[in-house]
Amino acid sequence: MTRAFVVHEYGGPEKLKLEDIEVGAPGPGQIRLRHRAIGINFVDTYQRSGLYKVALPFVPGNEGAGDVVAVGPGVTDFAVGDRVGYTGAVGAYAEERLLAADKAVRLPDNITYEVAAASLLKGTTAFYLLHWTYALKAGETILVHAAAGGTGQILTQWAKALGATVIGTAGSEEKCEIVRKNGADLAINYRTENFVEHVRQFTGGKGVDVVYDGVGAATFEPSLDCLRPRGLMVSFGNASGPVSVPRLGILADKGSLYVTRPTSGAYFRTAEDIRTAADALFNLIELGKISVAIDHTWPLEKAAEAQRALEDRKTTGSTLLLP
Ligand SMILES: NC(=O)c1ccc[n+]([C@@H]2O[C@H](COP(=O)([O-])OP(=O)(O)OC[C@H]3O[C@@H](n4cnc5c(N)ncnc54)[C@H](OP(=O)(O)O)[C@@H]3O)[C@@H](O)[C@H]2O)c1
């Protein structure tokens, strides 16, 4: 038996129930993993609340790292004792789990379990957003919302490593200080300042090439006013609530803009996709160009408290559960 959280019905953090479950032996193409660290992500809260539907009952969580303790038939890439991490596989809030081997990546010696579990989902997201959703080039300017958050901090550092100019928003002065420490050229407290005015002033009225927006409802429309003509709005999350676009013509009015709503599932379709992104992430961590901020750690049994802190905007950087 292993201890795991189970969601039997959608709702608030109180719907996370700690239970003893049977994990079983890995089936064909699977490995059994003993977690050493588990990443908490905003998507975990969407799946728990039912905003994103996962078939009930389910073990929540999408990111983790640990040791392979068993391999199923047909698995040739991994052996018992390997250190691995993964992203994009529901079932992480548990001491042990089964995992499709093609979701796993081998951890380089100098990548700890904690760094892997704090960065694989957020960092591979930063990779695809900056390379595949839009091929960001040196000299271009972007706006990153919630830039002191888990994804925002990695996105900011990665964009700076590519030579871009980065404007970051955050919800307090302390968070803005973190945004600046990560290399952003301008940090705006969007709870007290009008970020559209600041962006237009900073860019000399030109606007930014791309907006990366994981905040959603609260920032979507004003963000369109931050873009240059034919700029790209990347709406990749909904921390403040989901976005709806009532009238397509708004994109014409604001300068023939582009909008995309990407998800990692559509970008990481094969083991090779995810390994390409993870290799690029680990390489930048090893080069010291990305520092993964593990600002909050909780014991596994405190998953509900950890999710509450994330939803209440009380966190910065990455949050881990330690089994
Ligand atoms: N599409 C994808 O592939 C993908 C992948 C990874 C993440 N995401 C999305 O990226 C976003 C960030 O994810 P994360 O896990 O790294 O979380 P996070 O950024 O660490 O936390 C969310 C942050 O959003 C900001 N926020 C603004 N309004 C909020 C509100 N009303 N309620 C709660 N938070 C609010 C807060 O920062 P301030 O206090 O500074 O405003 C908060 O700290 C989420 O929307 C997530 O779903 C999408």
Image: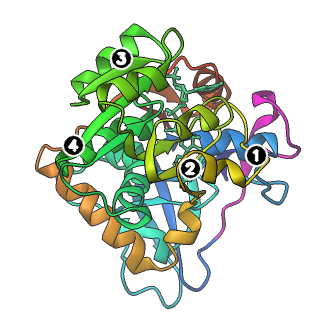
* Residues shaded magenta: 6-24
Quick one: label 2 or label 1, which is nearer the N terminus? Answer: 2
Q: Which residue is mark 2?
A: 236
Q: Calculate the distance from the C-alpha at mark 2 to the C-alpha at mark 3.
A: 21 Å
Q: Is residue 190 above or below residue 53?
A: above
User: Does 177 appear in magenta?
Assistant: no
Q: Calculate the distance from the C-alpha at mark 4 to the C-alpha at mark 2.
A: 20 Å
Amino acid type of the residue that numbered disc 1 sits on in the rendered structure? Ser
Q: Are marks 2 and 3 in contact (CB under 8 Å)?
A: no
Q: Secondary structure at mark 3?
A: helix
Could you tell me which residue is drawn at 33 percent across and 21 percent down?
Answer: 187
Q: Secondary structure at mark 2?
A: loop
Question: Which of the 4 quarters of the picture holds residue 168?
Answer: top left
Quick one: label 4 or label 3, which is nearer the N terminus? Answer: 4
Amino acid type of the residue that numbered disc 4 sits on in the rendered structure? Lys
Q: Calculate the distance from the C-alpha at mark 4 to the C-alpha at mark 3.
A: 16 Å
Quick one: label 2 or label 3, which is nearer the N terminus? Answer: 3
Q: Dividing the image into four quarters, tell me where ligand 1 lies.
A: top right
Quick one: label 4 or label 2, which is nearer the N terminus? Answer: 4
Q: Are marks 1 and 4 in contact (CB under 8 Å)?
A: no
| Residue at the bottom extreme of this rendering | 74
Question: Which of the 4 quarters of the picture holds residue 316?
Answer: top left
Residue placed most toward the observer, 163 or 62: 163
Q: Which residue is mark 4?
A: 160
Q: Is residue 288 left or right of residue 220?
A: left
Q: Which residue is mark 1?
A: 244
Q: Calculate the distance from the C-alpha at mark 3 to the C-alpha at mark 1.
A: 28 Å
Q: Is residue 50 above or below residue 306?
A: below
Q: Is mark 2 within 8 Å of ligand 1?
A: yes
Could you tell me which residue is drawn at 26 percent across and 30 percent down?
Answer: 184
Q: Which residue is mark 3?
A: 176
